[in-house]
Amino acid sequence: MARSVSRPVLILGDALAYLVVVLAGFVTHREIEALPHRLWATYLPFLAAWLSAAGAIGALDPHRAADPRQLWRVAAAALLAAPLAAVLRGALLGTLVVPLFVAVMAGVSLLAVLGWRLLALLAARRGP
């Protein structure tokens, strides 16, 4: 049986993946001057929505994370988290939710979290 990555490590890795995605968005759009206020107003809603969706779907369960057949949970959680996070972000910033932003964040965050989760899965399978 494959070793599993602990829940705290999953959460930390996911949180870092989301932070990288949000920072990349600010850099890509040349909005560095908007840091740190808008960074937190974007990052925290996405992290909260991810943790809620991933927790509800079982994507934070270490035993499921050790099974590559369960990676669909990561994808589903990312796709559910994006619209919820965008609504929370819009409420914090007093802005409308732009559907294109939701779609881009869903896709990019899915790739980031799925990418790190695949690396963690491979590392756990290799062992020490």
Image (cartoon, rainbow, N blue to C red):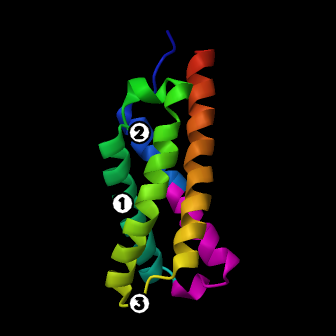
Q: Which residue is mark 2?
A: 59
Q: Which residue is mark 3?
A: 95
Q: Which residue is mark 1?
A: 49
Sequence order check: which comes first, mark 3 or mark 1?
Answer: 1
x, y (%) of residue 109? Answer: 56, 57
Residue at figure coordinates x 38%, y 82% from the top left? 90
Q: Secondary structure at mark 2?
A: loop
* Label 1 packing within 10 angstroms: few (<14), some (14-19), many (20+): many
The part of the image, by quadrant, that contains residue 47 is bottom left
> Closer to the camera, 88 or 37?
88
Q: Secondary structure at mark 3?
A: loop
Look at the numbered discs 2 and 1 and tell me whether their residues touch, using CB distance below 8 Å.
no
x, y (%) of residue 55? Answer: 32, 44
Inter-mark Cα distance, 2 to 3: 30 Å
Sequence order check: which comes first, mark 2 or mark 1?
Answer: 1
Horizontal arrangement in the rendering, residue 110 relative to residue 63 (left or right)? right
Instruction: Say which amino acid is labelled 2.
Output: Ala
Look at the numbered discs 3 and 1 and tell me whether their residues touch, using CB distance below 8 Å.
no
Q: On the rendered image, what quadrant is the C terminus found in?
A: top right
Residue range of the region highlighted in magenta in the rendering: 18-34
- Check the image and report above or below for 80 versus 94: above
Instruction: Say which amino acid is labelled 1.
Output: Ala
